Image (cartoon, rainbow, N blue to C red):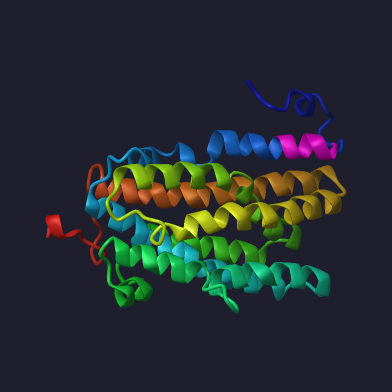
Amino acid sequence: MSLRPDVQDLAPDALMSPEQLETALREIGATRYHNLHPFHKLLHGGQCDHGQVQAWVLNRFYYQASIPMKDAALMSRTDDPALRRVWRSRMEDHDGAGDNEGGIERWLRLAEAVGLERDYVMSTRGILPATRFAVDAYVRFVRDRSLLEALASSLTELFAPKIHEERIAGLLEHYDFANERSIAYFKRRLNEAPKDVRFTLAHVIERAGTRAEQEAILGAVRFKTDVLWAQLDALYHAYVAPGHIPPGAFVPEDRR
């Protein structure tokens, strides 16, 4: 059943209320977020073998490492110092600043815990072609589309705490490499993501003054869920079924 029947009853050009727009955004998460993907169900349920976990960590690094570049592209597009000040904290969350080592460093620690060499991960040589295409498309989207759409594309963070909670519990229960040090990235994001999304949600809702702009916000979030889903599709195809690993991509030790 749809979560937005009142929105469907509106005229095509009628403005949604802030509550209706937020409900529509949350419906996207309920139906399209990548916690629903079969690969994540395998991962969180302890059904991935070691090579599949390594492939996930390796490919996801490319996404993590591209987030600060995406955010830098967004900041370069606005002349609002207040927005830049708020958004700059996102880059620091990932790149690190002061006593905060940063999310990228925490992800590399996870990579080392699953037996991947740091230099190999950072080189991105072994990532899947579809990973590169999907993540690069996200960076281009933020760089080239309207500023409102660029901001809204980060609103998948509305749904992130749930997947991080599932992931923390699943990894700790099922995998020997999982401990407080190796999964620190996910625990940190339980606090960082809600902080970021509170600002962004209020900001885009306030600035969407037409129904077309509101629909653009929804479209940006759907695009971002597609980016996340496409990465898992590629992992499933290469490392689960049918198991077609593209030339040049990472090959787990047991398949060499």
Query: Horizontal placement of 22 versus 70: left or right?
Result: right
Residue 47: % across, % down: 27, 40
What is the quadrant of the N terminus in the image?
Answer: top right
Q: Residue at x 47, y 69 (%)?
A: 104
Would you say residue 22 sits in the magenta stretch? yes
Query: Horizontal placement of 168 versus 115: left or right?
Result: right
Q: Residue at x 34, y 64 (%)?
A: 111
Q: Residue furthest front?
A: 180
Residue 12: % across, % down: 81, 33
- Residue 21 position by quadrant: top right
Q: Residue at x 45, y 67 (%)?
A: 106
Q: Nearer the viewer, residue 250 or 57?
A: 57
Residue 209: % across, % down: 87, 49
Main SS of the magenta segment? helix
- Report the magenta residues as a range: 17-23
Would you say residue 10 sits in the magenta stretch? no
Residue 142 visible in the current orientation: yes
Q: Residue at x 68, y 40 (%)?
A: 25
Q: Nearer the viewer, residue 65 or 108?
A: 108
Q: Residue furthest top?
A: 1
Residue 253: % across, % down: 15, 60
Query: Horizontal placement of 185 versus 224: left or right?
Result: left
Residue 244 visible in the current orientation: no
Q: Please, is residue 122 above or below residue 63 in the view?
A: below
Q: Please, is residue 23 above or below residue 228 in the view?
A: above
Query: Horizontal placement of 191 versus 166: left or right?
Result: right
Q: Please, is residue 226 above or below residue 121 in the view?
A: above
Q: Please, is residue 195 above or below residue 81 in the view?
A: above
Count of labels in the image:
0
What is the quadrant of the C terminus in the image?
Answer: bottom left
